[in-house]
Image (cartoon, rainbow, N blue to C red):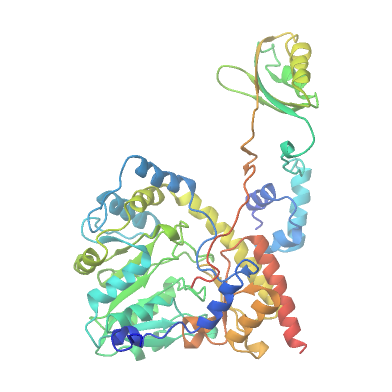
Amino acid sequence: MSLSFDKKISEVVQSIPPSAIRRFFDLANEMRGEVISLSIGEPDFVTPWRVREAGIYSLDQGNTHYSPNQGYIETRSAIAQYMKRRFHLTYDPVSEILVSVGGSEALDLAARALINPGDEVIIVEPCFVSYKATVLMAHGVPVIIETKQEDEFKLRPEDLEKAISKKTKYLILGYPCNPTGATMTRSDLERIVRVIERHPDLIVLSDELYAELTYGDDPFVSIATFPSMRDRTIIVNGFSKSFAMTGWRIGYATGPSQLIQAMNKVHQYCIMSSPTTAQYAVIEASLHGDKEVKEMRDEYNRRRRVIFDGLNKAGLTCFEPSGAFYAFPSVHECDMTSEEFCERLLKEKKVAIVPGNAFGACGEGYVRISYASSMENIREAMKRIKDFVADVRSE
Amino acid sequence: MMNRQELLQLIERNARVPASELAVMIGADEKTVSDELSKLCEENIILGYAAIINWDKTERESVTAMIEIRITPQRNKGFDQIARQLFRYPQVTSCYLMSGGFDLMLIIEDSTLREVASFIAEKVAPIDGVISTSTHFILKKYKSNGIVFDVKSSDDRETVVL
């Protein structure tokens, strides 16, 4: 008889449900190579050469050792300069910045550094899939706020107020948003800030991985730029999305030193330090990468317009996304669940997109379309989506 | 307001994108874009639309040479007259006035090495005012007009990444 581990695996890990779209995942992977994939949450661009070259040079110099736990001071200083230059935020590289293994590790560090069993964490859905899992794994209780298309998937202050309880430890804000492409403007944030100010113990974890990728007239604003928020906000950011560096696994957290030092404690015992080569590469990215970032942003913006135009022509309602590289149209008109829509599109037209329910229950009825793919692929995929919707409607 | 620079950048990269698609990409309407394109042609800002070809992969024999030329500038005419005299030859694909150790840089494309050599000996060197020439033949093209030759791009990303 083979050994059963059912009772051995921790209850917390067992309690985390497998992805809502597991079946779709398997199907999409089987069809790898024969489909156009607009289901990828990472840039199609290769890391800019100047950044790759800096990584290669560091290897050439034999920089292959551990770094200090918190990251090289040169890397942290470069990040501090970048934050100041791009987002008008000032952090002390010595005590207020931690270099992590991608933004994902920083989300986990925050959960483990902050949560006592039973503490509540407010999560705004639809959102990146890790938020809920990191909270559960730290024995926290996720409290979900559902956002809606008619509000352009922004967080409404009244919903936030209702979700806050005595047990609330922190709020995770993820704008620009994966999967909706929503952003929060300064005035949107102002209304949220007013609510938070009424709860002096509430901490904000702001996931700003897509901060460089906003397209409208309103520039990205970090919630930490509000004076009352600065000392209770942990910013999680990284180079994956903005500098096309997903595989390097490098990100960072900035915030009040007490919180950053607590996160560093967890980081030091489970990770030791972030990849050394990547830390050298991002010095170059932080200090000299603005032009390359702009070129990628401009290209994403053009693709965004092509996708939005294509969705309108296909007859799917979508609010105009203003950030990240996703559109999140509704498939209600087709009288299908998200998953049915995606599965049939995959099988019948060989286009892969992601069912919205992967990002939270309220994502049901929507699909995520990534425009981190070549213009050529996007054009062809939009043509096929249009045909598919027409087919469905004539059934 | 139409973004001229962006429009030019886009067609410099791919001149075959129709105005209707360019319009969507830059967030303008089609007529504005086609009007702007005509205007750019009239103003001689867009000088032509060309394909970038890797001739090495075809049957055609061709050699490319870069010729550095030192000349004595002429009174009232500077370098322009000699430049004009040279760039009118069809095998001269580019002609630049340079700073540094020489004055004109010609890029010549012709079918054989001998033809390039005779062009220099018979057409360039004898010109009054030409002091010296120095010819460099191109052995292999790695990148030209911003395009890397012989690289096929492939997407090796996972099919679904959340």
Closest to the observer: A40 or A60?
A60
Say left or right for A79 vs B126: left
Quarter of the image that includes the N terminus of chain A: bottom left
Residue A356, above or below A33: below
Residue A320, above or below B139: below
Say left or right for B106 vs B115: left
- Asked if residue B110 can be seen in this view, the reply is yes
Q: Based on the displayed image, in which of its 4 quarters is residue B114 positioned?
A: top right
Query: In the image, residue A82 lies at what x, y percent?
Result: 36, 54
Closest to the observer: B123 or B76?
B123
Query: In the image, residue A194 lies at what x, y percent?
Result: 33, 80
Say left or right for A172 vs B57: left
Residue A389, above or below B155: below
- Asked if residue A228 can be seen in this view, the reply is no
Which residue is at 77% across, 56% downward? B34
Query: In the image, residue A50 lies at what x, y percent?
Result: 45, 45
Closest to the observer: A2 or A285?
A2
Quarter of the image that includes the C terminus of chain A: bottom right
Query: In the image, residue A67 lies at what x, y percent?
Result: 25, 52
